[in-house]
Amino acid sequence: MLILDVFSPLLLVLFLLPRYSCRAADIPEDTTAEFSVRLYHRLQAAGDQDNIVFSPLSVALALGMVELGARGASLEEIRQAVGFSHLLPGVEFSLLQNLTAALSEDNAHYVIRFANSLLLQEGITFNPEFLHLMKKYFQADVETVDFSESAAVADQINTWVENHTESKIHDLFSADDFSSATRLTLVNAIYFRGSWKNQFRPENTRTFSFSRDDGSEVQTLMMYQQGDFYYGEFSDGSQEAGGVYQVLEMPYEGEDMSMLIVLPRQEVPLASLEPIFKAALLEEWANNVKRQKVEVYMPRFKVEQKIDLKSTLKDLGIKNIFTNDADLSAMTDGKDLYIGKAVQKAYLEVTEEGAEGAVGSGMIALTRTLVLYPQVMADHPFFFVIRNRRTGTILFMGRVMTPEVVDPNDQDFDSM
Ligand SMILES: *[C@@H]1O[C@H](CO)[C@@H](O)[C@H](O)[C@H]1NC(C)=O
Ligand SMILES: *[C@@H]1O[C@H](CO)[C@@H](O)[C@H](O)[C@H]1NC(C)=O
């Protein structure tokens, strides 16, 4: 047995930005929805923060890159947890490749960019077959660096990340994140920017009270529109009035991608609805919402989260790759590699159109008392999913417990 003061942190950094959309031609159904929902429940149970946002697709891609270099229990745990165990060995790589290719196809309606990078410690020899497959399935850039020059490496990765996220994310790493013991860093960045099919008019945005689950209120910028969306009312199975909740699906331009909003009744905390969420329910919502005119009040929001994937994934059964028993022998011949660190940073900004819109001071076009259509009033916590409508691939999932808070110096819907 050799010494293990040489550990090998492998850092997964994932990252997401605003919206996007896609065209999925003959793509197989994504099989990772259950994994996505389990991740959500873990993050919710961890209770680190109020708002949640993460990218299930990005986690699956990062794990795919690791899986490519894994064997034995390290490999099996990933296949099992992510939802690939019913596929023939290796088919998941082709699946991930096809799902990402499908997302990148339609570049007329939105911008989505996947940028995968693999940084190796100079002087270490990685298996050529592994490098070849990384390029083939993940289009990953491969570079060698000297991790003992930790400040320079952090700068280099931060610049790379900035370049791939339209400068939305800065200073992701600091020199402390790397050391002479670091062998391999995986960076997986996803950038998404799309426009609503039905945009909100900035002049209809107003300051409005948002009631948080603890009963407190904050002032936020509430967007408004009346338009054609997909809408449905569902029941959590209880007989109580509060058991009914609303689901609104708002497509992005191109209609391949959409955001689903799940909103409990005003008096019902989101936390009491969350336990029922599961993959089959996502399908049920998506299949049963109907196109109709809806009045939508939705806060502008910006959610951001940095997740320690190591502890989260361990809870979901992916443990081996983080221990000395890890078998990443398809990456190198040695058995001394394991994953020391895994991080995802996700950022999502939802506005009237996609860019920041100016807040108008005009009058709103209608009165609240005249309700002609179903009304979705997201002035209290809600759950959201941004997904590909054809394949079910989930780009983002999360919840808004506290939206963007503003000074209450604008006009109010309430006073009208
Ligand atoms: C991915 O696409 C290729 C080319 O269309 C196809 O041959 C392959 O079977 C697809 N992979 C999966 C897992 O569907
Ligand atoms: C980032 O972009 C700038 C300007 O396009 C370029 O000079 C630089 O090499 C890029 N850096 C990385 C790490 O990709």
Image (cartoon, rainbow, N blue to C red):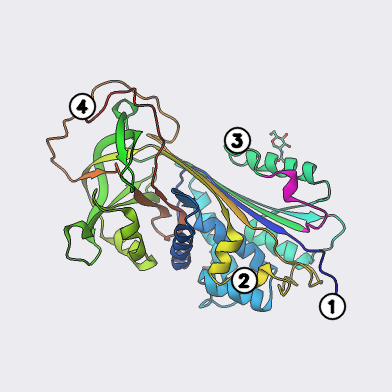
Mark 4 vs mark 2: which is more N-terminal? 2
Secondary structure beneath label 4: loop
Q: Residue at the location (41% across, 36% down)?
A: 404
Q: Closer to the observer: label 2 or label 3?
A: 2
Q: Residue tagged by mark 4?
A: 415
Q: Residue tagged by mark 1?
A: 1
Position of residue 148 measured from the top left corner of the image (x, y, whole percent): 83, 50
Q: Closer to the observer: label 3 or label 1?
A: 1
Magenta stretch, residue numbers: 173-183
Secondary structure beneath label 1: loop
Mark 3 vs mark 4: which is more N-terminal? 3
- Asked if disc 4 and disc 2 are in contact, CB closer than 8 Å, the reply is no
Mark 3 vs mark 1: which is more N-terminal? 1
CA gap, disc 3 to disc 4? 39 Å
Rendered-image quarter of ligand 2: top right
Mark 1 vs mark 4: which is more N-terminal? 1
Q: Please state which amino acid type lies under the numbered disc 3.
A: Ser
Q: Residue tagged by mark 2?
A: 319
CA gap, disc 2 to disc 1? 21 Å
Q: Residue tagged by mark 3?
A: 167
CA gap, disc 3 to disc 1? 46 Å
Q: Is mark 2 within 8 Å of ligand 1?
A: no
- Based on the displayed image, in which of its 4 quarters is residue 328 positioned? bottom right
Secondary structure beneath label 3: loop
Q: Please state which amino acid type lies under the numbered disc 4.
A: Ser
- Based on the displayed image, in which of its 4 quarters is residue 237 positioned? bottom left
Q: Please state which amino acid type lies under the numbered disc 2.
A: Lys
Q: Please state which amino acid type lies under the numbered disc 1.
A: Met
Q: Is mark 4 within 8 Å of ligand 2?
A: no
Crowding at dot 4, Cα within 10 Å, few <14 / some 14-19 / many 20+, comes out as few
Crowding at dot 2, Cα within 10 Å, few <14 / some 14-19 / many 20+, comes out as some
Residue 386 vs residue 89: left or right?
left
